[in-house]
Image (cartoon, helix red, strand yellow):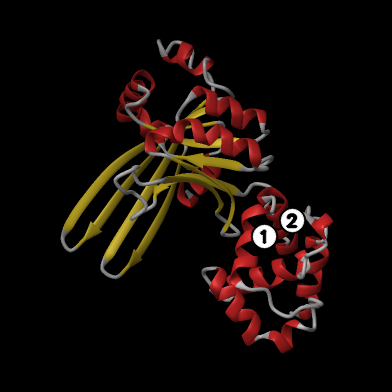
């Protein structure tokens, strides 16, 4: 643990000092404030008052790492520093410190969630679009937008600030946009994105095709059983030459790196009840098992 904290200190030394140091009234070192604040959050602290209380409660232990020339900063000091520090610099330092080495074919799931209780008379509830590494359970980045409909414009902005090279980016049907597939392809990543009625022509053609020919395609199955529930998922993937499937041929060419249309058939047996559902996806992948893995991880 002590080696990890020392490593954290070293990483944080590169962060730009956000305070006016020329006046000579800086009582606490930037790295001391950041270390105490981050240790507080790791220990489930929630706010700047918790940071001050954590510092006083653990001062003997903390003196092994920060210099603390003037003791523990107060909550207002923590607030001023964390409000002014460069968030991208801090994020990069933490990411390096955590040693978050993603798998080469890891899945980065992009998803939007509305923050309950964040709305009031002046504005609607905020909507957060985040990118989550499924294998490591680490959030790469997030953007807050006024409401859910802004998610379409937020996804390209989010992709601009995170590294997804070599990964498989997954997203729901709201992100099934040609510009988003271009952005993912430009970032040297693959994609698996939900397909629904917001792309009516492609959706209807895909649905009709799988209704008729899904059994002729490569398939992959997974099953889960527990607590009186049995679930079977069958994954199908159409790839290759689609010439002759008018207007599919034109539709495919207008999407960046679109190599396949996938379907997931889910059959759930629970309490003498059977539920079945088909979901459709566009993807740059050509292997049905990789497609299945990415769809499950999302």
Q: Secondary structure at mark 2?
A: loop
Q: Position of residue 258 (x, y in %)?
A: 54, 25
- The picture quadrant where one finds residue 183 is top right
Name the residue located 78 percent from the left edge and 61 percent from the top edge: 12
Sequence order check: which comes first, mark 1 or mark 2?
Answer: 2
User: Is 105 positioned to the left or the right of 12 in the image?
Assistant: left
Please name the residue that numbered disc 2 is placed on. 19
Instruction: Tell me the quarter of the picture where residue 190 sits.
Output: top right
> Looking at the image, do the residues carrying marks 1 and 2 touch, with CB atoms under 8 Å apart?
yes
* 267 relative position to 89: left or right: left
- Residue at 65%, 68% (x, y): give it: 38
Q: Is residue 39 visible?
A: yes
Q: Would you call the spot at circle 2 few (<14 residues within 10 Å), some (14-19), or many (20 or more)?
A: few
Residue 146 x, y percent position in the rendering: 41, 39
Indicate the position of residue 116 as horizontal and vertical percent values.
34, 54
Measure the C-alpha gap from mark 1 to mark 2: 7 Å
Left/right of residue 73 with respect to residue 172 in the rendered view: right
The residue at 53%/28% (across/down) is: 180
Depth check: 236 or 256 in front? Answer: 256
Give the residue at mark 1. 81
Q: Tag on residue 154?
A: none
> Is residue 217 placed above or below 20 in the rendered structure?
above
Residue sitting farthest toward the left: 272
């Amino acid at each position: 643990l002590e080696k990890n904290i020392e490593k954290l200190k070293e990483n944080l030394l590169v962060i730009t000092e956000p305070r006016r140091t020329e006046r000579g009234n800086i009582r606490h070192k930037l790295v001391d404030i950041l270390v105490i604040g981050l240790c507080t959050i790791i220990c489930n602290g929630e706010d700047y008052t918790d940071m001050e209380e954590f510092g006083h409660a653990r001062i003997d232990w903390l003196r092994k790492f920060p210099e603390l020339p003037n003791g523990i900063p107060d909550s207002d000091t923590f607030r001023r520093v964390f409000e002014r520090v460069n968030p991208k610099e801090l994020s990069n330092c933490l990411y390096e410190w955590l040693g978050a080495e993603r798998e080469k074919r890891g899945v980065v799931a992009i998803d939007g969630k509305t923050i309950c209780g964040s709305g009031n008379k002046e504005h609607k509830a905020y909507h957060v679009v985040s990118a989550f590494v499924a294998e490591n359970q680490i959030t790469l980045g997030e953007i807050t937008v006024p409401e859910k409909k802004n998610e379409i414009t937020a996804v390209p902005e989010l992709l601009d600030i995170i590294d997804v090279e070599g990964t498989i980016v997954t997203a729901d049907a709201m992100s099934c946009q040609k510009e988003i597939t271009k952005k993912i392809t430009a970032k040297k990543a693959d994609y698996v994105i939900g397909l629904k009625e917001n792309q009516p022509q492609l959706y209807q053609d895909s649905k009709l095709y799988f209704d008729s020919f899904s059994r002729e395609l490569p398939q992959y199955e997974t099953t889960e059983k527990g607590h009186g529930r049995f679930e079977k998922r069958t994954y199908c993937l159409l790839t290759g030459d689609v010439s002759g499937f008018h207007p599919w041929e034109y539709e495919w060419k207008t999407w960046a790196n679109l190599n396949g249309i996938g379907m997931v058939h889910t059959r759930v047996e629970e309490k003498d009840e059977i539920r079945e559902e088909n979901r459709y996806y566009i993807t740059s992948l050509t292997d049905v098992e990789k497609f299945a893995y990415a769809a499950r991880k999302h």
